[in-house]
Image (tube, rainbow, N blue to C red):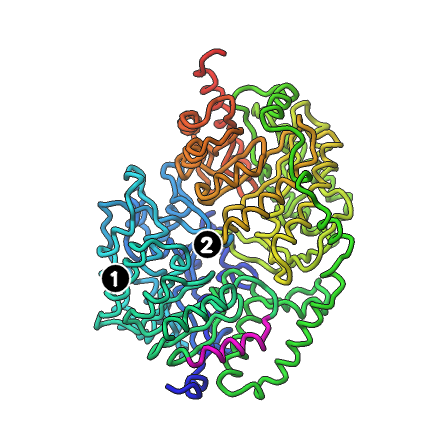
Amino acid sequence: MTTETAAAAARATVYGYPRQGPNRELKKAIEGYWKGRVTAGALRATAAELRRANWRELADAGIDEVPTGDFSYYDHVLDTTVMVGAIPARHRATAYSDALDGYFAMARGTQDVAPLEMTKWFDTNYHYLVPELGPDTVFTADSTKQVTELREALALGLSARPVLVGPVTYLLLSKPAPGVPADFDPITLLDRLLPVYAEVLADLRAAGAEWVQLDEPALVQDRTPAELDAAARAYRGLGTLTDRPKLLVASYFGRLGDALPVLAKAPVEGLALDFTEAAAANLDDLAAVGGLPGKRLVAGVVNGRNIWVNDLATSLSTLGTLLGLADRVDVSASSSLLHVPIDAVLERDIEPQILRWLAFARQKAAETVTLAKGLARGTGTIAGELASNRADLASRANSPITHHPAVRARAAAVTEADARRSQPYGERAAAQRAHLGLPLLPTTTIGSFPQTTELRTARADLRAGRIDTAGYEERVRAEIQEVVSFQEKAGLDVLVHGEAERNDMVQYFAEQLTGYLATRHGWVQSYGTRYVRPPILAGDITRPEPMTVRWTTYAQSLTDRPVKGMLTGPVTMLAWSFVRDDQPLGDTARQVALALRDEVNDLEAAGSSVIQVDEPALRETLPLRAADRPSYLGWATEAFRLSTGGVRPDTQIHTHMCYAEFGDIVQAIDDLDADVISLEAARSHMQVARELAAHGYPREAGPGVYDIHSPRVPSAQEAAGLLRAGLKAIPAERLWVNPDCGLKTRGWPETRASLENLVAAAHAVRGELPAS
């Protein structure tokens, strides 16, 4: 095909779309089902209507080929586990009795059966359910979901492309099942898994699929020769099947690198590459392999993970360069639009001038269509869109909120000494033990407590004007009193105020810092039915006044026990926001760190002896390629130390991380120089405690003994068992007892019971320790 005909053939598509519905209808239906208020049939009907609405919306926008199979009740990796029949033995009876209840049991657990482990999807804040595999795993195909959703789209008269997690990524994301040796490598199951994929592909072809997309984002990470050989075998095997649709192998989140020649040679009909985060590298690599003659290239030139308007002229230039490198070039977002909110037009509280800078899922679909039109028919056909886009980009570049001279001067004046505590850890630890007087195995929580119906109602009433600020604050004080009183009665050693005043651990701070924008409808799925509204980091950061001192001081006035000041760290403030892309991330992190440093110092001055600065996103934001990690970890750990480096030696600094693979960043955790770190460990069976011990981590740590992402209440015996496992890796004088994460999403009955059991476990295990 010539360059001209390749351009004329250009079509617009996307890899996936937000699942929740414009008013989070899916969340409400699923949670209603869990509570028995919504029937299974009603839940399925709601889901089907949301899928149809998404497809119609995309088609009406001009998307030529809509995705199917990306919709999920909870998680697309869990959907893949069902598709390949890799249901853990402990869940099979429930799953075979009732598929929907079995699905949710794997996701959330039951009182008697633990759920699958949950961790971050590459370097995003989306969480997936980790498949559990072993040498005895038997795969069986179940294409029901994928075939049903394809038929639904085809019945609407649409061109549709099923999207599946690819077999190599599925295995690379998996872990050995409980009881399987830790050195078992799931990739050894590839030859057993491929026939199941072959069966699913045949079913999809029979149902009318012309193309099927197989997502292989794991191939943008560093991969061993054996793993690359597995990818070659997988797509040689699938590509040579006779009964299959055309195959589009999709990568995203970065440079495909060494996997590109492997896939370019494979007998598949198309590849999808990221030309946003890795545009230059993927362009160079594509040229180096001689392009993709005879194949379809789907070019991800619209950023699927951030919310800034596309630079249409730059994207068209990239697309023009690609025309000579493939038989056909189509246009897409760089990843699923799952990672952005639905529609920027709904944000009535953002100034119209700034709203021009933003593109959510609907706007990104429109940008994709515009670029495909410009590529196929010439830039003259989109002259108006190009002119408007140039004006939007100029408006942002010239806005005063993007450049605050005093903020930049302060950041430039930071010295190495500013990011160091005044004394080494050993001396600090002795001062803190003398000051705090805590027992061995001190108990605490991570920070948040359940957000009650009364509290949420009060917050909604305040927004709607039904109550005034005084009425709302009265409710907050009552919630804090209840939280503090419960913790004292339960016997916790270090208390928290429960964060009743906070809507979200990032948004709450963003709303009080200049340079941030808050959305009203910008919901994004974090996991399951948990949705967050990431704020938009649009300009230079300042802290006009203290943000947490008032409520922390009030909580401390209610008790003689130490109450932790609670802050969200600078890396997490970036990672869980839509961050500005017009300056290096390290520069933005330093600005946020300086604002938080002022807050930490104010908390200490107000009497806080324990201050927690959470960094759950430190691992999540780790670059996918090892070569890019030292630079990131350098500025990330410096930003944390800059936030906390100004306090006295006897002030104890905590941090917290959850639901990530911590083994990759143990040295960075050490480099934070926090006095205490709490980490998720319950679902992963204390793996992180062993990783800290192997590293020789010298500070105090609290690997979680209560999985807060499940409604089940762990018994005191279960928590004690995990605590004893933790003691095998971390000595008692450095081991804390705490849940995995905050309790905001849990209900009070399960929270009370679980924390009472946690304290009982700590007392039981303390009694087993040798007398000092």
Amino acid type shown at disc 1: Arg
Q: Which residue is mark 1?
A: 233
Q: Which mark is residue 624?
A: 2
Q: State the quadrant of the N terminus.
A: bottom left
Q: Quadrant of residue 397?
A: bottom right
Magenta segment includes 312: yes
Which residue does the image show at 48% across and 11% down from the upper left? Answer: 771
Left or right: residue 404 compared with residue 740: right
Q: Position of residue 590 (x, y in %)?
A: 66, 49
Q: Residues within 10 Å of mark 1 (few under 14, many from 20)?
A: some
Q: Residue at x 57, y 58 (%)?
A: 523
Q: Is residue 275 left or right of residue 643?
A: left
Q: Which residues are magenta?
A: 310-324
Most prominent secondary structure in the magenta stretch? helix
Q: Is residue 53 something that shows in the picture?
A: no
The answer to whether residue 311 is above or below residue 650 is below
Q: Seen from this angle, which residue lies furthest top?
A: 771
Q: Does label 2 or label 1 sit earlier along the sequence?
A: 1
